[in-house]
Image (cartoon, grey):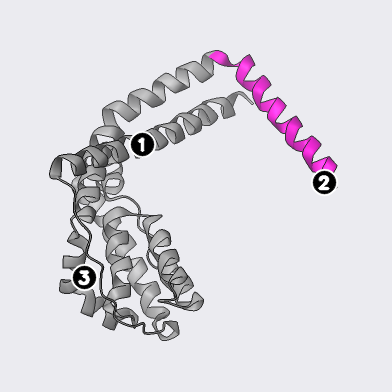
Amino acid sequence: MNKLLIKLKYLFLSIIIIIFLLNINIVLSSTYQACEIFVTKVFVSVFPFIILSDILLYYDYHKFLEKVFGKYISALFNLSPNTSIIFILSMLTSYPTNAIFIKNMLDKKEIDKNTAQNILTYTYFPSLSFVFGTIGIYLYNSLLVGLIIWLIILLNNILIGIFLRKKNNKVIYLNYEKESKKSIIDTLKNSIFKGFNTSIIILGNIIIFTIIINLIPKY
């Protein structure tokens, strides 16, 4: 059975290579099309917000938000304010940041597995820049559309969190360890590098899906 699966895998990969070679013009034109969309529409709306989000996180803006809104999120979802930081970070930085912080808390035994699974279900947020910039402004030429979509996503997560609140467990209050901060120049440099890395991943996805979309009608 395993040998058959391996053969099928290599057969599938060989078919993909043949399709790409036989349709090199479509592949090249699709890549150009995807790059044009990315540079003119996606990058300009996503890149600044990636940098801003990273800087806000580095200088602990999320901890300020936790102090302001933590108790309300705690009461709403039956969680301690320390755990509510996951909900706040997810809104600011989008998926998969929520999974990373949940995993860290789980490894440190600050929450149990059941609570971790519950929090994961209602902390899924797409990128703010994607919702407001790419969908709202680029696709619909309206910031209001982006706001409406984001509020629907927020409401959906809140309703799921309320539904699961009885299954959550209260966790202990934790003290944050103080870290020495880098200069604003170094912080900005690191944020720009992260922004470029994230943007390249987005570009790669756009290219692949544009090629697939343009190849499908031919077959």
Residue 13 lies in the magenta-colored region: yes
| Callout 1 amino acid | Asn
| Mark 3 neighbour density, 10 Å: few (under 14) some (14–19) many (20 or more) | many
Task: Count residues near mark 1 (Cα–Cα under 10 Å), then give few for <14, some for 14-19, many for 20+.
Answer: few
Q: Is residue 159 above or below residue 201?
A: below
Q: What percent of the width, then of the height, locates residue 189? A: 22, 37
Q: Nearer the viewer, residue 176 or 70?
A: 176
Q: The disc labelled 2 sits on which kind of residue?
A: Asn
Say which amino acid is labelled 3: Glu
Q: Circle 1 sits on which residue?
A: 197
Q: Position of residue 75 (x, y in %)?
A: 27, 83
Q: Give the spatial CA distance, label 3 vs label 2.
A: 50 Å
Percent position of residue 192, x then y: 25, 37
The residue carrying pointer 2 sits among few (fewer than 14), some (14 to 19) or many (20 or more) residues within 10 Å by Cα, namely few
Above or below, 85 against 90 in this view is: below
- 41 horizontally vs 32: left or right: left
Left or right of residue 112: residue 94 = left
Q: Which residue is mark 3?
A: 66
Provide the secondary structure element on which disc 2 rests.
helix
